[in-house]
Amino acid sequence: MRGSPVTREILSHRLTAVVEEMAETIRRTSFSVFVKQTADFGTCLVTPGGEVFAAPRAISGNLMIGIPARRAIESLGPYRPGDVGISNDPDATGGLVTHLPDIWLWAPIYAGGRIIAFAFSFVHSSDIGGDVPGSISWAHTDRCQEGLLIPPAKLRAAGRTNEALLRTILSNTRVPEQNRGDIEAQLTGLATAQRRIDEIVTGYGAEALGDAIEDLLDEAAGRAARLVDRLRDGRYRFVDYVEGLEEDGVTTVPPTRLSLELTVSGGSTHLSFAGTSPQVAEAINLPTGGEPGHYMLVFALVNYFCSLDPGIPYNSGLVRGITAELPPGSIVNPGPGATCGVRAAVFFRIMDCVLGCLAQAAPESALATSSGAVAIATVAHADPVTGQRQVSVGQPLTGGSGGRPDRDGLNGTSFTGGWLRNVPNELLERDAPVLVEEYRYRPDSGGAGRRPGGAGIVLRLRALADGVTLAVRGMERLLFQPWGVNGGRPGAPGRAVLNPGTPGERELGRINVVTLAAGDVLLIETAGGGGLGDPADRAPDEVAADAARGLIGPEQASRAYGVVLRDGAVDAAATERGRASPPEPAGPFDLGAARRAYDERWPQAVQEQLIAAVERLPRARRAGSYRAAYLAAQARAGAGPVTAELIRDVIEEQG
Amino acid sequence: MTAPHALRARYRLGVDVGGTFTDIVLTHAEDGTVHTAKVPSDAARPASAVAEGVAGALARHGVDAGEVEHFAHGQTFALNTVLQRAGARTGLLVTSGFPDLLEIGRLRLRDPIDFFAAPRRPLVDRADVREVDERLRADGGVERPLDEAGLLAAAGALVADGVQALAVSFLHAHAHPEHERRAVELLRAAHPGLVIVGAAELWPEEKEYERTTVAVLAAHVAGLLGDYLGELFDRLRALGLRCPLYIAKSNGGVMSLDTGSAEILRAAVETLLSGPAAGVAGAIRLAGAAGVDRLITMDMGGTSVDVALVEDDIPYSTDSVLGDFPLIIPTVEISSIGAGGGSLARVDSSGVLKVGPRSAGAVPGPAAYGRGGTDPTLTDAYVVCGFIDPEDFAGGAVTIDPQAAYASLRPLARRLGLTVEQAAAATIDVATAMMHAQLVPLLARRGLDATGSHLVAYGGAGPVHAALLARSLNIRRVLVPWSPGTLCAFGALATGLRQDVVASIGETTATLDDARLERVWKDLAEQAHAWYARQHTAPYQRPELRRWADVQLVGQSFTLPVVLPDGRPPTVEALRSLFADAYRAAYGVDASGGELDVRNLRVTLTAPGDPRLPAVAAGAAGAPREHTVHESGERRRAVRLRRDELPVGTTVHGPLVVSAPDTTVFVPTGAAARADALGNLLIDLAPDGDPATGQGNDTEDRRES
């Protein structure tokens, strides 16, 4: 420790106050509905070298630990007091920005005439231009569709605002007043940071502050290393997918493969994403700038550290010990200009890969995975009085969390999107001509286990007028189930059905956009979390309690747990017989039937072969070639497995 | 109703029941003289403990119960019942399709990155929730009629299974109460004597989860609270109290205690924060009399500091949280921050000094109390630093053992490589930093700058720590009110009648017309006046109504409160212009073009309380006694005084410790404290004047230590 442990604790509180005050200022004064409803904004303080040393935990979203700030900082140097940088450019900021609606601002913070830190903030704006309102669509294949790109620039130079730049930005969005409000809110927040740091320096001195910053980072790094020491040394692999698209049973878009190998040795961790799918044409690429500790790669790891050691300082020291291989041109390190509006799907699936590796490295503290998706449903309709198109506030749809050591999974919400607030159904029905028939936990959806996965949510709504349009983006885990671990079973996959139980019943897959006529019913069921541990080890009384809470029905109790319920009570004799049969032997993971079938059709080695072959092509061709080769090989394989020969053939044909 | 006027009535009684102590304030209605007392609370027999405390206080001061003209009561009974989940086993009947309403809530996790987060635990067990076949649309149209037989069967089954109270909450009942009202009627007929709560009847605000929570809280608490208040009523009457009795509400006002069983349901949810709210009301009253209208209240107890940020009026929240439960009923906005006097200090595995969140509680308490505690607390740190006078603490009710305080901090000091005094100072500094760190974001949330505010300190430990916290926030002035240990009891006496009513109308300005606005506000005003008519109103001034609304831009999900000034006609045009002003003030953005979504209309009725202030005994100058304090790592000569040794107008300079029967005030080096005629001690942290403000210096009766 450089400074005193007392000053370090005092300044830790004071620095937290600075970033929380910034966050509260932005929350109060910004305009974006994302700030108010989904907490999609952030603030932090960063060392001149680019490490985050203070960030709020509870006010905003939790995506500040591991932001790569160095490139953004360097892009505008040298700085003078009163300078403020701005950008939403993923490439030029080296992955600080991961999609264009996030507008980042940063400012140098001075102590005694020299830069002691940078304050950073971002707000997810309601719109930054481009070809759709809100600026986000999976179908974007050209970055110009995604809106205005702001390369790093000084929005303020020595306190003077670059009005031309500001006007240019505001002239290119659909909600200029809101954007102006968001930017001004951030400017206020940044000014607050300098004022508060001044107070700290007056009270404690710049040297003590500098020491405390380094001590806090070192302490986080040291404590994280001690947690890593508890993991078993070795190499652990986990592969998971962002699902593809099918039309009439035929694949049109292949799944995106995320392959992670976690190497733990001597207290350090290495994340290799070799074997991950090449970048794709559509907007799910995740720009990381190739930064090993990037916030969207390490989120699960950071949460794991903070969960196991609740007092650990919350800063980028947590990710200091992480190295990574991020293949250039892959979906986790795409080339310049890759579209990225919906990069969250890849972000969430990486969380699952990290948890899958950790489950192997520390089986005793393994967590099963969450429902793994955050979909936001918005309802649009023509107002019967004014004829104007009205859009309701979005209803977030997420599912249960996975089973946890000594705790059941959380129902209806999870760690992918645990910061989201829902919209009361009464408001939804008043704002749009729909009737919510059901909004409840989804029975039998949590994966069975000693610690069951949390239940998903059922949302069943009926249109009360013609022309009600539902836009639902971000549905995932419709095919590949949230996996169970250490004997736990997978959670039920999500699904969306139009007019269930009628002759016109139709599976809607990811939905995207569906227009309903009066009387049409849309049923959305989100995925349950995966189970942890052998279901046979769950006490019959706990199973009966789950049934009494409506989480499982008697059939599931019997089928998944071998517990026989009569009128809600455990039939002890029948249960004993039911439980006598040994559980299916399984590896650490139960990935579910769909995933097993997929792995048979597309053996992992063959997938790797295809990815490796495509990686040898010029970067510009990879996305197209990968898809074409994948679809061709699969079509040629028919119902059988895709083989190494097939891959060689199709690659050769593509030249 | 009017107060039955007793012939010799001339005393007013305020009582606040806290977890450890019951505070009693007895004032003489004419000359304003005040007596205070603290007696132990007794959770096992709360009503008789209060009655005995009152009887003791009256006897001690030779007051006959018949001479008491006013009794106001703050209680924690309802809150404790909720927090301990000790009330009635409650069943919930909800619209079919929404059985998990209470558990789903609003989804958001308290700490979204904690993989081991515990789920929200509703007050109603899921197995005690029944779905009822009925459904109204948002416009009131009947989608499915109420299945009356099914309702009665479901309720019957719950009751047969041992459920002791029922809450009913149907979708859209806040606007279209027909089904819910009918259900409640049927259930009351079928189960006479059972507590049955209709959510919309109790609090008709849009948002099904929050409204249902109100109903469930009421159902859970009402039975026990009714018993408690009934017993208290009987016992006070048996003592000979014939005056009207009032109970403090979470909104900082009071209501009559004896207005019948229908009011108990509302009392159950409107008095959950009774004591702390009365404290804020009392602080505002006393500070206001001293000419202070911008203040931060600082009520410091054993585990935390309760703060409220005040600009002129009581700050309200319609979005507060009690443990696992949201509370949408307007409530004084109070936040718990930092550490309290009982918070434990320790060195963590990284060698860092931490304070709290664990507390030594009332038992065993700080080591210095000699009740078996050996771990160091913040109070022990005060003792070691000399911020408490060990020979004069809590009016002699607690004996301070400085050696025990030293001994408790010694292991900590050793681990930190510090002297015991340095370790104590470090403990206090860390606690200050925690309070600072949590207060600053609260100020930012409201857009306030602390520097121009007064810090108003009360509670046992507040005045010990107030100057230190003020200094860290660049607040120049601290006000320690008269009798800071019994401020909640005083506040209950000083505040007025207050009632909030709400109607969710949920209509945009595209269709809303002036007639509807006028009609709904008029109806709310009638409800408020009907409530007022059931109160004993004699001790209070004429009632005032405030009309306000929750308004947002169409498509937004966050409202702003818009107050319709007195005399302004209730028109849509007025709302538009007031909203545009409020929006500009809050966000600095012109929103005057946008269509508005008017979610709720509200009316608040207030009948201000007795404006008289306590007359405080003048005090006589005493000889300051020598003392030693440890400040900023230095040992300094200081003095100690008793509060009654500071006559009105006296100014004294720190370092100084002032002991009163209910608190200790620490005045640090460089600060000065002046006793004013209202009994306040005003601490100025920059008595030599702040060049920036040009404010001068108090010159009278300077007394150097």
Image (tube, coloured by chain):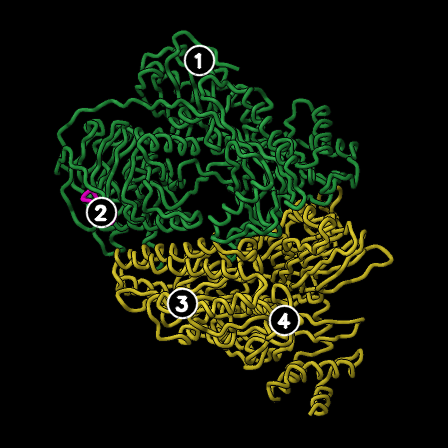
Question: Where is mark 4, residue-wise?
Answer: A240
How crowded is the residue under tag 1: few (<14 C-alpha within 10 Å), some, or many (20+)?
many
- Whether marks 4 and 3 lie on the same chain: yes
Mark 4 is on which residue type?
Asp
Residue A460 shown left or right of residue B665 in the figure? right
SS under mark 2: loop
Which stretch appears magenta? B686-694
Alpha carbon of mark 2 to alpha carbon of mark 3: how far?
A: 33 Å
Q: Which amino acid does label 1 sit on?
A: Leu
**To which chain does the residue with label 3 belong?**
A
Counting from the top left corner in percent of width and height, residue A653 is at 72, 91
Front of the two marks 3 and 1: 3
The picture's colour for chain B is green
**Chain where mark 4 sits:** A
* Marked residue nearer the N-terminal end (2 or 1): 1
Q: Main secondary structure of the magenta part?
A: loop
Residue at left offset 42%, top offset 71%: A154
Check the image and report above or below for A78 versus A31.
Answer: below
Q: Mark 3 sits on what residue?
A: A156
Q: Which of the 4 image quadrants contains residue A351?
A: bottom right
Front residue of A393 and B671: A393
Q: What residue would you read off at disc 2? A: B690
- Judged from the image, the secondary structure of the residue bearing numbered disc 3 is strand
Instruction: From the top left corner, tell me how far across and down residue A622 is, in percent.
Output: 63, 84
**Residue at mark 2 to residue at mark 4: CA–CA distance:** 64 Å
The C terminus of chain A lies in quadrant: bottom right
Residue A3 vs residue B648, the one in the foreground: B648
Which residue is tagged 1? B241
Crowdedness near tag 3: few (<14), some (14–19) or many (≥20) residues, C-alpha within 10 Å: many
- Name the residue type under label 2: Asp
Residue that lies at the very extreme toward the right in this rendered image: A503
Name which residue type carries label 3: Arg
